[in-house]
Amino acid sequence: MSGRRLKSVITRQKLDYPRATVIVDPFEVRISLLASGRFISIFSSALSARRPDLKVLPVKQPLMRVPVEIVTLKNRTISPRAQLFIDTSREIAKLVKRKEG
């Protein structure tokens, strides 16, 4: 999530925006910063279930629509696993669209 989007979510929840923002990608670095007790981060809810040492803050995030594309290379055969992933992704997208619709 971009720093600008994070600030928007925090302000909508009427929370004070943190004084400093650090943006890092490696998962291990984010966990180390969290462990120091001086930082907050955004992870999927699946991570908090696997990491009981992390405290989940009560911030509600609205569902965000992000365009997604499936891209394949020309003249290449798609592996059965990749095809299964594509088919499953399309089915999930249909279910989500029906649920929202």
Image (cartoon, rainbow, N blue to C red):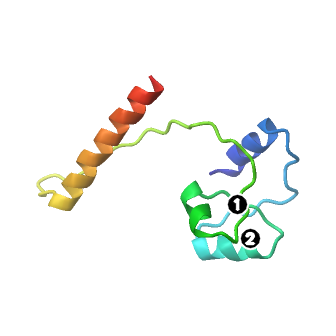
**Farthest residue in the top direction?**
101
Relative to 64, residue 31 above or below: below
Write down the residue under mark 2.
34
Query: Residue 49: x, y in percent?
Result: 58, 63
Question: Is the C terminus in the top left, top right, bottom left or bottom right quadrant?
Answer: top left
- Residue 13 lies in what quarter of the image? top right
Which element type, helix, strand or loop, lies under badge 1? loop
Query: Residue 10: x, y in percent?
Result: 78, 44
Instruction: Specify the label residue 41 is tagged with.
Output: 1
Q: Does residue 9 appear left or right of residue 19 in this picture?
A: left
- Residue 93 lies in what quarter of the image? top left
Q: What kind of residue is marked 1? A: Ser
Relative to 27, residue 90 above or below: above
Pick whichever, 48 or 9, lies toward us: 48
Q: CA distance from mark 2 to mark 1?
A: 7 Å
CB within 8 Å, label 2 to label 1: yes
Query: Residue 52: x, y in percent?
Result: 66, 69
Q: Measuring 70% from the left and 67% from the top, which residue is drawn there?
A: 54
Which element type, helix, strand or loop, lies under badge 2? helix
- Residue 47 lies in what quarter of the image? bottom right
Instruction: Specify the label residue 27 is tagged with.
Output: none
Q: Measuring 74% from the left and 73% from the top, which residue is drawn there?
A: 33
Q: Measuring 23% from the left and 57% from the top, which residue is drawn there?
A: 82
Relative to 61, residue 94 above or below: above
Q: What kind of residue is marked 2? A: Leu
**Label 2: few (<14), some (14–19) or many (≥20) C-alpha neighbours in 10 Å:** some
